[in-house]
């Protein structure tokens, strides 16, 4: 099936999850600059309101918990009713927990799967029908470099991110004939509050100074520093703008994983 022309910037609706801070915030601001009408969601209404205040265009904010099984459907229902069909979905919300396999509880594992894999699955399931009917859509899942490799103290997180990459690749094949692309962006260590929390956890568990642990995280990347949220947002926007890229996982890790 030939791809129909998608919405011009300013006419399309973009949904960004986990958009109150960090990567999601940077993505939201890029999409706003490109003229998209935004629907932003995260747990914190306060953070969402701060992002909305930085935007120049139409912005809807919907605070909620994506691990609530019914929330993804309610979110998209509201977006479609108030703004129109979803042209772009950036599934960015996620979290990590650090523990050895032997110390990872069932609850830890389930929490990682629910937010990092099940929630994106529910969102894709809800939006893909409308996108294929419209003949246009862009889905970008913010995964992780740990969707490509393993790491100590990260088994549950890496498993969830490996899983979401399988979701991306499968959905990409199902939608390819309908003008819809589904891609993943796989960041390395990014200068966000989530990384700060990981640094603090490792420092507390090992007794190493926080500054030393943070430097070790930065050293994992050949560029010798943490990435910025804006650098990840650039890759997300490439996935939004590129019509011929589908089913791909873009590493944004300063060269740590070469593929």
Image: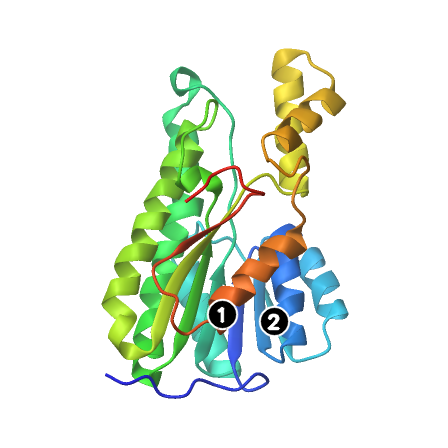
- Horizontal side of 142 relative to 117 (left or right) equals right
**What residue sits right under mark 2 in the picture?**
31
Cα distance, mark 1 to mark 2?
A: 9 Å
Residue hosting label 1: 240
- Count residues near mark 1 (Cα–Cα under 10 Å), then give few for <14, some for 14-19, many for 20+: many
Residue lying furthest top: 207
Q: Horizontally, is 109 left or right of 82 in the view?
A: left
Say if 55 sits above or below 156 in the image.
below
The answer to whether residue 63 shows anywhere in this view is no
Q: Give whichever of discs 1 and 2 has the lower sequence position.
A: 2
Instruction: Mark 1 vs mark 2: give the one in front.
Output: 1
Can you say whether 43 is above or below 189 in the image? below
Residue 205: give its label: none
Which quarter of the rendered picture does the C terminus lie within?
top left
Q: At x 45% / y 41%, what residue is drawn? A: 258
For residue 163, side relative to residue 174 (left or right): right
> Judging from the image, what secondary structure is the residue with disc 1 in?
helix
Q: At 39% from the left edge and 40% from the top edge, which residue is drawn? A: 148
- Residue 14 seen: yes
Q: Residue 197: percent from the left, percent from the top?
A: 65, 32
Residue 253 occupies quadrant: top right
Mark 2, Cα crowd under 10 Å, few <14 / some 14-19 / many 20+, is: many
Circles 1 and 2 in contact, beta carbons < 8 Å: yes
Image position, residue 188 (x, y; %): 55, 41
């Amino acid at each position: 099936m030939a791809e129909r022309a998608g919405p011009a910037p300013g006419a399309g609706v973009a949904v960004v999850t986990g958009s109150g801070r960090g990567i999601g915030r940077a993505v939201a601001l890029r999409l706003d600059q490109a003229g998209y009408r935004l629907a932003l969601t995260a747990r914190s209404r306060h953070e969402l309101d701060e992002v909305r205040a930085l935007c120049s265009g139409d912005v809807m904010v919907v605070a909620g918990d994506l691990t609530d099984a019914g929330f993804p459907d309610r979110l998209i229902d509201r977006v479609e009713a108030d703004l129109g069909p979803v042209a772009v979905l950036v599934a960015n919300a996620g979290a990590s927990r650090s523990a050895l396999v032997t110390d990872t509880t069932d609850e830890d594992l389930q929490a990682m799967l629910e937010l990092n894999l099940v929630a994106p699955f529910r969102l894709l399931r809800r939006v893909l029908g409308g996108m294929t009917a419209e003949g246009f859509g862009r889905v970008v899942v913010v995964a992780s470099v740990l969707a490509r490799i393993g790491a100590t103290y990260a088994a549950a997180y890496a498993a969830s991110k490996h899983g979401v990459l399988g979701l991306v690749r499968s959905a990409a094949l199902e939608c390819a004939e309908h003008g819809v692309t589904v891609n993943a962006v796989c960041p390395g260590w990014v200068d966000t509050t989530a990384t700060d929390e990981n640094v603090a956890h490792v420092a507390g568990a090992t007794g190493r100074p926080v500054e030393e642990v943070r430097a070790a995280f930065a050293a994992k990347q050949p560029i010798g520093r943490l990435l910025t949220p804006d650098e990840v947002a650039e890759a997300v926007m490439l996935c939004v703008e590129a019509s011929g890229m589908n089913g791909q996982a873009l590493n944004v890790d300063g060269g740590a994983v070469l593929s």
